[in-house]
């Protein structure tokens, strides 16, 4: 893996810095902070099983420190890395009710960036040794630098993102991100602690044969989704498709981007906006999907055009290979006309 010819993420960041419109080095430092935090979280995720085996009792570990749930720990790791490096003026996390204002000792409120993050998505999978992920989204603040960050700095449409990415803690750990010039994936060599460019210019196949949905909720789905799922299962042409659902958005998305497929988390009875969060999960994944030639919608409109109204807003999510998402939207529209 760690061959001379492979470019490291650090080298890649330096090389791309000049391509970036607003480049002052601050943005590269921000991505470096995320890179570092992801390695620390990776170490903790890999230790999760050991902590269970050695039976760390109650709420304290052998050092006498309080044991934390991994998602809380991951949250702290990312917030610490981002705030200590003084590269953002605010952070909003799926783990926190409200956003955090960051004031740096060196430059007060002068940072121009805000980060929104889901530090450990799919964390219910940790107990069973299944992949989890981190999702992040970066915006330029809309308020004037020098002043404290405000809610409106976070409530921006997905189309205003300047970067987004995810880390998948899988059979290998990868970081995949976009700054609006395509999508690149880097694999961690754990022996060196270095990410190497392993998946340059990632592209969603325009068609795919995989659908990913929690089919246990079938009975509660809108009729358009039910009809689309029946279409996926029909014996015709290249169908029936294959069903694959890990229950970890980052992993399901990552597989579908490589192999071709669609991920759906629709609305369902009692949850008109589904489960996933617009700002922490859907917008960043939508930005990556579009940059890789894929598509993301709420069944009717582009995810990145939705005007956010609150930090923890939920939204139905259809994301993946372009023609598959378009077909699902067709079924949604057909059903809406009948209503
Ligand atoms: P989380 O942020 O609480 O981890 O929830 C998000 C996760 C996604 O990763 C995954 O695709 C989905 O929830 C699974 O939900 P369900 O178990 O309802 O299918
Ligand atoms: Mg989540």
Image: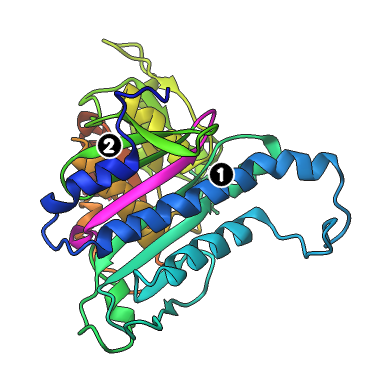
Where disc 2 sits, the SS reads strand
Q: Nearer the viewer, residue 173 or 18?
A: 18
SS assignment at label 1? helix
Q: Which residue is at 57% across, 65% downward?
A: 76
Task: Say which residue label 2 marks.
Answer: 184
- The crowding category of the residue bearing disc 1, from other C-alpha atoms within 10 Å (few below 14, some 14 to 19, many at least 20), is many
Q: What stretch is highlighted in magenta?
A: 158-172
Residue found at x 29% / y 11%:
238
Q: Where is 260 relative to 21, above or below?
A: above
From the viewer's perspective, tell me whether residue 322 is left or right of residue 226. Answer: left
Q: Is residue 162 magenta?
A: yes
Instruction: Report whether 83 appears left or right of 62.
Output: left
* Occupied quadrant, residue 113: bottom left
Q: Which residue is drawn at 34% across and 60% down?
A: 30
Q: Which residue is most to the front?
A: 4
Q: Can residue 122 be seen in this view?
A: no
Pointer 1 residue Cβ closer than 8 Å to ligand 1? no
Residue 176 is situated, as x and y percent measured from the top left of the image, at: 35, 40
CB of residue at label 2: within 8 Å of ligand 1? no
Residue 199 to residue 271: above or below: above
Badge 2 density bin: few <14, some 14–19, many ≥20, Cα 10 Å: many
Identify which residue, 111 or 214, lies in the foreground: 111
> To which residue does mark 1 refer?
42
Q: Where is residue 150 in the image (x, y as percent from the top left)?
A: 32, 83
Depth check: give the residue in front, 257 or 223. 257
Q: Earlier in the sequence, mark 1 or mark 2?
A: 1
Q: Residue 322 colored magenta? A: no
Report if residue 54 is visible in the image.
yes
Give me the disc on residue 316: none
Question: Can you say which quadrant of the picture contains the N terminus?
Answer: top left
Residue 97 place in picture, x, y as percent: 51, 75
């Amino acid at each position: 893996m760690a061959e001379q010819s492979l470019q490291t993420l650090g080298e890649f960041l330096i090389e791309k810095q000049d391509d970036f419109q607003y480049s002052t080095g601050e943005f590269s430092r921000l991505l470096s902070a995320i890179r570092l935090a992801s390695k620390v979280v990776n170490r903790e995720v890999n230790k999760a099983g050991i902590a269970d085996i050695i039976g760390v009792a109650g709420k304290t570990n052998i050092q006498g420190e309080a044991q934390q749930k991994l998602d809380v720990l991951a949250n702290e790791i990312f917030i610490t890395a981002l705030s200590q490096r003084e590269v953002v003026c605010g952070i909003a996390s799926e783990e926190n009710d409200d956003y955090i204002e960051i004031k740096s000792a060196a430059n007060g409120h002068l940072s121009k960036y805000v980060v929104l993050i889901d530090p450990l998505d799919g964390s219910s999978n940790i107990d069973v040794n299944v992949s989890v992920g981190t999702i992040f989204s970066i915006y330029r603040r809309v308020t004037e630098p020098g002043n404290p960050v405000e809610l409106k700095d976070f409530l921006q449409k997905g189309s205003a993102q300047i970067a987004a990415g995810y880390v998948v803690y899988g059979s290998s750990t990868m970081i995949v991100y976009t700054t609006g010039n395509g999508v690149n994936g880097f694999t961690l060599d754990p022996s060196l602690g270095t990410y190497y460019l392993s998946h340059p210019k990632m592209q969603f196949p325009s068609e795919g044969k995989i659908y990913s949905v929690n089919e246990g909720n079938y009975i509660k789905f809108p009729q358009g989704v039910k009809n689309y799922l029946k279409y996926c299962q029909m014996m015709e042409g290249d169908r029936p498709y294959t069903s694959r659902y890990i229950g970890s958005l980052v992993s399901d998305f990552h597989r579908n981007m490589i192999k071709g497929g669609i991920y759906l988390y629709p609305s369902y009875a009692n949850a008109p906006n589904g489960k996933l969060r617009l700002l922490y999960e859907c917008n960043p994944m939508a930005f990556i999907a579009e940059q890789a030639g894929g598509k993301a919608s709420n069944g009717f409109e582009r995810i990145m055009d939705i005007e956010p109204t609150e930090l923890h807003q939920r939204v139905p999510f259809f994301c993946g290979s372009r023609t598959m998402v378009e077909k699902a939207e067709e079924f949604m529209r057909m059903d809406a006309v009948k209503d």
